[in-house]
Image (cartoon, helix red, strand yellow):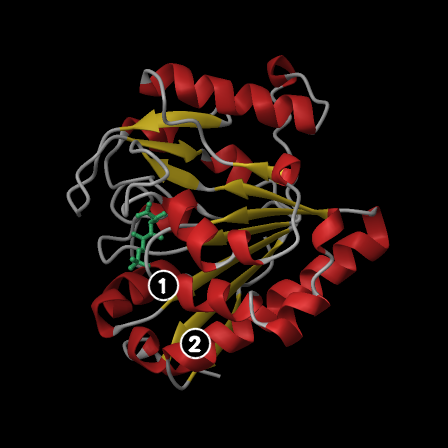
Amino acid sequence: MTAPRLTICDDQDTLAAQAADFVIDRAREAVKQRGQFTWVLTGGQTPEGMYQLLAESSRRDAMPWSRTYVFMSDERFVPYSDPRSNFGMARRALLAKVPILAAHLFPMPTDGPTPAAAARYADRLADFFSEDTARRRPPCFDLILLGLGEDGHTASLFPGAAALRVEDAWATWSPSGTLPPSVDRITLTFPVLNAARQVAFLVAGEKKAAAVRDVLEGRTDVADRPAAGVRPHDGVLTWFLDEDAARLLSRQFSP
Ligand code: 6PG
């Protein structure tokens, strides 16, 4: 894996704007090269501002929505109408405001037993990418967005969780971590995250600074800070940080 690219922004609003423009560039590039843009959204609060910017006219009109396909990095096991739902947040902030076909949206199922729902999602990915999950060659998404918890989790891959060791499935059940909301989750697994062409972390706030430092400066292991396990094999890894989240980085990392 090549060294991660860092974009350190003055504040969270600037991070949202720079990340939104990054998404547009990746989308247009993917459509030009392959005719479609397969995009994994993440949940939590950090990306919401960026989603809202992408729904505003100038950026909205720059996105190739008719060629864009949207998936989720992870989901809380609640109805999409629940304020804790990651897909529900993305739909409110962005997807309901842009001309994307419903058939291009692939939310994670949260209406059945969680392990089976994870397997159903993996099957949906296999259908879309016309791969056979038995081949274990994970889907190659054009862009996966990720957040970072202050404990170093990403998606719903929590410290010490069994999900960190899943190599033979593309999505898996993940019991709630130590941070709220304490609900069961479904999450994409490391094989999928690391098969992507582009992965971008969006991280803001001083509470994340220690986890950012540990992951970027290699001071940790995957069990303790799961985000350290995101090392795209051939893809490009980019971190969008605000000043607060970057404040503990040593000089070598602060461009
Ligand atoms: C989730 C997210 C999770 C999130 C981090 C950061 O379901 O909780 O996918 O991985 O990205 O917890 O969340 P904030 O952006 O709210 O700090």
Category of crowding for the residue at label 1, using alpha-carbon neighbours closer than 10 angstroms: few (below 14), some (14–19), many (at least 20): some
Corner quadrant of residue 64: bottom right
| Side (left or right) of 107 relative to 64 | left
Q: Amino acid at mark 2?
A: Phe
Q: Is residue 11 left or right of residue 25?
A: left
Height in image: 149 above or below 72?
below
Question: Which quadrant of the structure image shows residue 176?
Answer: top left
Q: Report which residue position mark 1 lands on.
A: 46
Q: Nearer the viewer, mark 2 or mark 1?
A: 1
SS of the residue under disc 2:
helix
- Residue 250 is labelled as none
Q: Residue at x 29, y 33 (%)?
A: 78
Q: CA distance from mark 2 to mark 1?
A: 22 Å
| Residue 166 seen in this snapshot | no
Query: How far from the left and from the top, in percent, is residue 129?
Result: 70, 29
Q: Secondary structure at mark 1?
A: loop
Q: Is mark 1 within 8 Å of ligand 1?
A: yes
Left or right: where does residue 168 sit relative to residue 1?
Answer: left
Residue identified by numbered label 2: 253
State whether residue 4 appears in this view.
Answer: yes
